[in-house]
Image: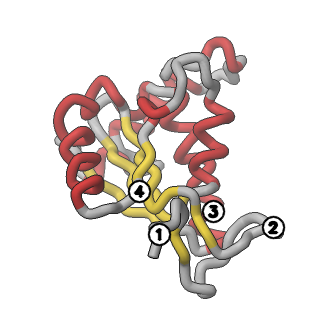
Amino acid sequence: MAASSSTSVPSSHCPDSPSYSGKWEYDVFLCFRGADTRRDFTSHLMAAFARGKIKAFMDGMLDKTESIDELISVLQRSALSIVIFSESFAESSWCLEEVATIAPRMRDFGHRVLPVFYKVDPSDVSEDSGSYAATIEQKHGASKSPDDRKK
């Protein structure tokens, strides 16, 4: 039997698209700050997924000319998101936009999310009091145009 390029998911998953067909293009979408984790943790994770026949997506799979919109589109076609919080994660507008897309999908549609805290304490990521809050306000407090977004 030929392997399918998409993954079946239980009907208990409520997709955010009315045209949902019961298949996902990717099993896992990785949200991470490349400067912090791409060459070590994330690359090892991708290798483990490949060995386990888990179809995972990371941004390096896109053409360098692609926009954040394409990443968001892939995220929406993924069954699970793994968010790898790292030291400079909050400095990336792209990472924050991905999380801003993941959060309502998790809340409204039961999208599964696995947070990973890579060399940061979970309390650092706290919305109200963690060190991320200051970084987000400092770097992204003012509205930025898409051209100003830093990956």
- Which residue type does callout 1 highlight? Ala
- Colour approach in the figure: secondary structure
Crowding at mark 4 (Cα within 10 Å: few <14, some 14-19, many 20+):
some
Q: Is residue 46 above or below residue 17?
A: above
Looking at the image, which is closer to me, 48 or 151? 48
What is the spatial separation of the Cα atoms under label 4 and label 3, in whole angstroms? 20 Å
Secondary structure, mark 4, is loop
What is the spatial separation of the Cα atoms under label 3 and label 2, in whole angstroms? 16 Å
Crowding at mark 2 (Cα within 10 Å: few <14, some 14-19, many 20+):
few
User: What x and y, as percent, mark residue 14?
Assistant: 66, 77
Secondary structure, mark 2, is loop
Mark 1 and mark 2 lie on one chain; the one further toward the N terminus is 1
Q: Residue at x 74, y 69 (%)?
A: 20
- Which residue type does callout 2 highlight? Ser
Looking at the image, which is closer to me, 148 or 30? 30
Q: Mark 4 against mark 3, which lies toward the viewer?
A: 4
What is the spatial separation of the Cα atoms under label 4 and label 2, in whole angstroms? 22 Å
Left or right: 134 in relation to 38: right
Q: Which residue is mark 4?
A: 55
Which residue in the rendered view is the most extreme toward the top?
A: 147
Which residue in the rendered view is the most extreme toward the front?
A: 1
Secondary structure, mark 1, is loop
Q: Which residue is mark 2?
A: 19
Q: Mark 1 against mark 3, which lies toward the viewer?
A: 1
Quarter of the rendering containing residue 24? bottom right
Mark 4 and mark 1 lie on one chain; the one further toward the N terminus is 1
Q: Which residue is mark 1?
A: 2
Q: Which residue is mark 3?
A: 105
User: What x and y, as percent, mark residue 90?
Assistant: 42, 33
